[in-house]
Structure formats: C-alpha cells, structure tokens
C-alpha cells in the first residue's frame, strides 16, 4: 500500500520552524511498507517553472537530518535554475537508506508513483546513490523524470556535464586568483570520487594538475587513484597543503570545525550546500582570502543536461551552455569584490532577483 502525507504542523516538530525551511511551497513525506521506501520530496519554488531536482539516496543518521538535507537542497535548486537562466523551479528528493544495501527496482518504482502523484509540480532525476537505471524504473510509473538513458530518448548520465561545469568554475576561479587558468602543477584535492568526482579528476589530471583524492568508499578511492595516478589522502584532509579544495560529496564540509583548518586558496566543487552557514562561513572565507566559487552556480551542468530533455537541445549544445559557467563565475567574483560582499551573496542576489521579477510579472 502506498501512502502519501503532505506534512501538517504538529507540536514538538520542526518543519515550518526549521531554520532550513525558507519559503518552501510544499514538503511531501512518502512511505511504502512493502518496499521499505521512506522518502521526502521538497518543492521550494515553482515560480520559474516546474521544480526539477535529483533524488538522493543516503543512509542518514536520522530522519531530521534527511529533512534538513532535502530543504537545503531544494532551495539550492531554485537558485541554480535561476542563475543558469533556466525556466525551472527548485525541488529535490531524498530516499532514506543505504543505496548499496536497500535500493531495489521495486523501491524505485514505488518512488516513481509518488512523483506521479504530484502531477508535474516536481520532476526528478538522479543524484548521489541513484543512477540512470533507477530512473528507468521511475519512468515506468511517471513521465515526470529526466536523466534517463540515451537509449530511451533521454540525455543520459548528467554527471559528466556536472563535472565539466565544475571544471570551468575551477579554471575561472584560478584566473581570478592567479591571473591565469592554467592548472598545471596546482595541487587539487577532490573529496568524493563518485560519478561526478571521478570525471572531475579526469579533467584535472588532463590539465596537468597534481590531484589528491578522498572518499568514504575504499574500493572506489583505490580504483580512481590508480586510474588517474592520483594520490590518496585519508587523514587530516582539511589541513592538507593544497591550492584548490574541490568538495564533491555531501555538503556542509565548510563548517565551524573545518574552516580554520583550510590551507588552500580556492574552494570550488560539485557538492551542494558546501557552506554549513552560508552567511557566517561565506564571510569567514572572504576574511581569510579564500576564493569560493558558489556551488549552485558551478555545479549547474547536470541541471542544464537534464533540462535538455525538456527543451530538446543536443549534447554538444549542452556542453556549450555549460562552458558559460566560466564567464559567469568570473563575473560574480568580480561583482563580489566590487561591492565588498561574499561571492555567495553576489550569486544569491542575482538568482533571487530573477525569481522575484518573474513572480511580480505573474501578478
């Protein structure tokens, strides 16, 4: 039996009063006893269009952490779509569980049924712990899905495009910091070498950078290190002397515990919500002289890719549009310096302005 509950405020819980609940339009809790599915779908905004965002499967420590994650991620998707000029809103979904142990085709199909119940307000795709095969299963229950295999008429795995956009963001940040985007000899730590992280390692290695890698999965870490002649780092990750830190796993790695340890000049990676506190930690990075490339800008390649299934553009055009992240990153870094604000604030202002103007014009 499939049950759907749109959350209603009750005593002693934290949704509407959750610090991460910032103007969200809808939060849906999904449970199916037969498959073991427990998922949360967060729709932050549909002002610019239907809320598009991937589904993440992660073994959260508790359900509260899962809720905070989906709230933060869905909000980030609103800004990612806006700053990229896409006619999409912001949404995200999380499935609670270990993807290596608990994910089944039946579970993903049940999740697809929940997506279908939202009648197109939310369009899903893959994210951490979820792949194109899983999207095939979801598509058996709903058409509100992107990131499906090319053999099914989709745009395929978005992770190579995401990695390319991050690479463009790194090069632009290097240009801003050092006056050149040549990464030859630069020490870059890629934390998290899944689909996106591994492809980023490939780009960095080909550019002549000295790449260091870190991941919680030993087998994945060793495979990527061997494949690209990268150096494995297991301990004292944040204290590593490096030029660029590229977080490509989960978010909030820039936090109270790590921010004073960083020994780098640039932070630019694929992870969403890298700043645990976007105001305080964005300001502290600015004070320390560390360049921060806003995550929702430089990791937008994946969204550009899955959107191509909706607006019907070629893969070549997808990469061409993703390459524009280079110029946008430079523009935002310059804007931040000129106005004495953080780079995160600069990117947020531009993204929010487009959403606000569109909302106003709809009235």
Image (cartoon, rainbow, N blue to C red):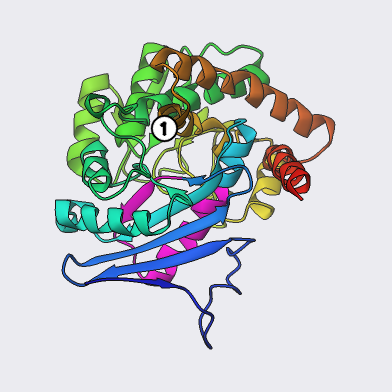
In the displayed structure, does residue 42 sit left or right of residue 193?
A: right
In the displayed structure, does residue 186 sit left or right of residue 344?
A: left
Badge 1 marks a residue whose secondary structure is helix
- Picture mark count: 1
Residue occupying the point 64% across, 19% down: 327
Whether 329 is drawn above or below 121: the answer is above
Residue identifier under label 1: 306
Whether 180 is drawn above or below 110: the answer is above
| Residue stretch in magenta | 53-77
**Which residue occupies the extreme bottom position in the image?**
11
Quarter occupied by residue 336: top right
Residue 326 percent coordinates (x, y): 59, 20
Whether 60 is drawn above or below 191: the answer is below
Check if residue 69 falls in the magenta segment: yes
In the displayed structure, does residue 14 sit left or right of residue 54?
A: right
Check if residue 106 falls in the magenta segment: no
Residue occupying the point 17% across, 39% down: 219
In the displayed structure, does residue 28 sit left or right of residue 60?
A: right
Residue 138 percent coordinates (x, y): 26, 47
**Which residue occupies the extreme right position in the image?**
339
Q: Is residue 252 visible?
A: no
Residue occupying the point 38% across, 70% down: 63
């Amino acid at each position: 039996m499939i049950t759907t509950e749109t959350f209603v405020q009750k005593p002693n819980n934290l949704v509407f009063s959750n610090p991460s609940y910032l103007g969200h339009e809808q939060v849906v809790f999904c449970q199916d006893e037969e498959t073991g599915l427990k998922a949360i779908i967060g729709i932050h905004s549909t002002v610019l269009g239907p809320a598009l965002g991937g589904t993440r499967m992660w073994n959260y420590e508790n359900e509260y952490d899962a809720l905070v994650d989906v709230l933060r991620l869905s909000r980030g998707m609103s800004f990612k779509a806006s700053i990229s000029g896409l006619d999409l809103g912001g949404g995200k979904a999380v499935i609670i569980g270990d993807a290596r142990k608990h994910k089944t085709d039946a579970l993903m199909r049940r999740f697809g049924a929940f997506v279908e119940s939202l009648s197109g307000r939310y369009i899903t795709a893959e994210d951490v712990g979820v792949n194109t095969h899983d999207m095939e299963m979801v598509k058996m229950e709903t058409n509100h899905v992107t990131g499906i295999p090319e053999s099914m008429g989709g745009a395929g795995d978005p992770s190579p495009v995401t990695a390319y956009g991050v690479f463009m963001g790194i090069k632009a940040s290097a240009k801003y910091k050092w006056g050149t985007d040549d990464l030859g000899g630069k020490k870059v730590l890629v934390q998290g070498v899944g689909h996106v992280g591994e492809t980023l390692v490939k780009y960095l290695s080909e550019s002549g950078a000295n790449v260091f890698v870190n991941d919680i999965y030993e087998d994945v870490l060793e495979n990527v290190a061997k494949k690209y002649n990268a150096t494995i780092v297991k301990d004292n990750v944040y204290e590593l002397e490096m030029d660029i830190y590229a977080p490509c796993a989960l978010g909030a790695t820039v936090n109270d515990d790590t921010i004073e340890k960083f020994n780098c000049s640039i932070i630019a990676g694929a992870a969403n919500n890298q700043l645990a506190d976007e105001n305080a930690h964005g300001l502290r990075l600015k004070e320390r002289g560390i360049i921060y490339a806003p995550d929702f800008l430089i990791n937008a390649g994946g969204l550009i890719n899955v959107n191509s299934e909706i607006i019907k553009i070629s893969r070549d055009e997808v990469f061409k549009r993703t390459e524009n992240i280079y110029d946008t990153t430079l523009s935002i870094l310059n804007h931040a310096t000129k106005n004495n604000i953080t780079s995160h604030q600069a990117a947020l202002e531009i993204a929010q302005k487009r959403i606000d103007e569109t909302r106003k014009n709809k009235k």
